[in-house]
Amino acid sequence: MDWKQRAAALARTAAHPGTPWYGPVMATPRHLCVPRWFTAGPEGWTPADGPADESAWASAAYADRTLVTQVGPVHADHAMDGETVIGLPTSSSTLPSLVVSMLTHGRLSEGQALLDVATGSGYSAALASARLGDDFVTTVDIDPYLTEAAAQRLDTIGHHPKLLTQDATGHLPGEYDRIVSMVSVPRVPAPWLRALRPGGRLVTTLARTGLILTADKTRDGGAAGRIEWDRAAFMETRTGADYPPLLDELFKQARDQDGDVVTGSPFPVLNVTQAWEVWSMLSLTAPGIEHRTGTDDDGNPVAWMLHPDGSWARAETKPASRAAIVHQGGPRRLYDMLDAIRWRWLEHGELPVYGARVTIAPDGATTLARGGWTVTL
């Protein structure tokens, strides 16, 4: 495979000539990090094998797109050809432009020690090693197969950063000038603050939001920064081989029952996870909501909201209508929270999540504030 021309084209898309990450993207053979990946289909995920079709391999690896490499506990390396795997993605090779964006937010310079959180395919560690040198890069992942495979693939590329297999939210050996996470967290883990050197900088996304948090360490052992105006969403951290099961039993209840309350909403059904500002605000207001979308028997849009505490909501928009009929059950009225956020957006023309000031206490308590609004995670 003549990958160098493709990598050069990718560099022009993912970075910009003259920026510090242009050269690393151009010099990194991404296809070696992702020899197999999953493609989504109506029945689930099926593996694609790069060496079996080098043209498709090159097209996939050097496109600015995310390649899912693991679904549930099954890595694409171990999936049988033609096998369909059902579950949530648990690892991927993130689209290169987003990797570059997160590293750029880290404001990295030569001589600084970087902790790359979520090794995944090893691509972000490869870019960082090309820029900083192997001795200045440590990469961590909870999955032993991921770190093992990444070590082998990075060796093939010619890079040998330090690889750790452990929970990145637990105790971290060593100290770092920069921590850049390619996985999302509910709030900033206290061990990150302890591992961050004075004046060090951390970059992460918050779980189930489109928010990028950047913060610099403060003298009290905490950190201060902001939510960037840029946006990104990553998989959440996990403590095992897979995420907890989806709320399928609650969904059976929410699918067609009337619920405790039946009301009307002045707004049409919304695919919340595609409305990043609204989704982020709602996730901060009521963390843990699971969203699903579909249609009723007549093809009309339906949206469901499910929460581990047993709360649920279902909204339907009928033909020629711009409103929705809403059914809700459980201890909280999830759709009322959503409507309150949509009203706030209409009244103010924006929501306060992007651009919010961030203050992080030494124990990891993460506070966002802007325009009189505040929330602590």
Image (cartoon, rainbow, N blue to C red):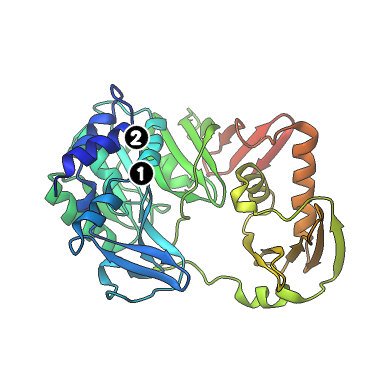
Kind of element beneath mark 2: helix
Q: Which residue is mark 1?
A: 64
Sooner in the amino-acid sequence: mark 1 or mark 2: 2
1 and 2 marks in contact (CB < 8 Å): yes
Disc 1/disc 2 C-alpha distance (Å) = 7 Å
- Please report the residue visible at 81 percent of the width from the left and 55 percent of the height from the top: 321
The answer to whether residue 351 is visible is yes
> With 325 as the anchor, is 181 left or right in this view?
left
**x and y, in percent, of residue 37 in the image:** 31, 61
- Please report the residue visible at 70 percent of the width from the left and 33 percent of the height from the top: 350
Q: Which residue is mark 2?
A: 13
Residue 102, by quadrant, is top left
- Please report the residue visible at 28 percent of the width from the left and 46 percent of the height from the top: 62
Looking at the image, which is closer to me, 41 or 35? 41
Give amino acid for label 2.
Thr
| For residue 204, above or below residue 325 | above
Residue 137, by quadrant, is top left
**x and y, in percent, of residue 228 in the image:** 53, 32
**x and y, in percent, of residue 360 in the image:** 55, 37
The answer to whether residue 136 is visible is no
- Please report the residue visible at 74 percent of the width from the left and 64 percent of the height from the top: 313
| For residue 338, above or below residue 73 | above
Looking at the image, which is closer to me, 221 or 138? 138
**x and y, in percent, of residue 281 in the image:** 66, 45
| For residue 317, above or below residue 174 | below
